[in-house]
Image (spheres, rainbow, N blue to C red):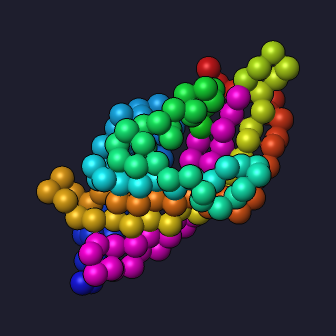
Amino acid sequence: MSLTIADRLELSELVHRYAAHVDDRRFDRVVELFTDTAQLALPDPPRVLEPTTVHDGHAGVRAALAPLASVTRTQHEIVGEVYTAAEDGAIGRITCVAHHWTASPDGVTDLVWHLRYDDHYVATTAGWRIARRALTLNAIETRPIRKLRD
């Protein structure tokens, strides 16, 4: 199987839509971007930066995203995308800088994750969907922030 230009554009749209929905707090929409049997593998930062915990299906993805609701705001910057055809779909390597801004009485902090998503996508009747996403952290930063938009 080879990926057409249309496939690559749709895969890119899928990846960017995931980031936009997370940043817009539309977690139900994020879940819809995964297959019913999808797996989301996450690390346990700051202790472990490689994916260690697997969340299964839509309920697992929803549960994995739940902690983001306590973060004041996020911003995901997709900085690299590479897609490769696979026998049963496509594989993606997505690099991203994810900002997690948290406001407290002491000020605003930006927890910055420099990360990579290793994805497996499948074509469905609804379009390309994520069948497996594994998040690896390459670095973690914490920065003070002067002002955060409400």
Q: Residue at x 62, y 20 (%)?
A: 150
Residue situated in front as seen by the camera: 82 or 40? 40
Q: Position of residue 43 (x, y in %)?
A: 63, 53
Q: Which residues are magenta?
A: 75-102
Going by the picture, which residue comes out furthest to the bottom? Answer: 1
Residue 118 vertical placement versus 40 (above, below): below
**Residue 68 belongs to magenta span:** no
Going by the picture, which residue comes out furthest to the top? Answer: 105
**Residue 82 belongs to magenta span:** yes
Number of marks drawn: 0
Q: Position of residue 148 (x, y in %)?
A: 69, 27
Q: Residue at x 19, y 59 (%)?
A: 124
Q: Residue at x 27, y 75 (%)?
A: 88
In the visual, does 85 lie left or right of 1? right
Q: Residue at x 41, y 55 (%)?
A: 39
In the visual, does 41 lie left or right of 122? right
Going by the picture, which residue comes out furthest to the left? Answer: 125
Q: Position of residue 68 (x, y in %)?
A: 57, 34
Quick check: can you spot residue 137? yes
Snapshot quadrant of residue 52? bottom right
Quick check: can you spot residue 21? no
> Dividing the image into 4 quarters, which one contains the N terminus?
bottom left
Q: Position of residue 53 (x, y in %)?
A: 56, 52
In the visual, does 82 lie left or right of 50? left
Q: Main secondary structure of the magenta part?
A: strand
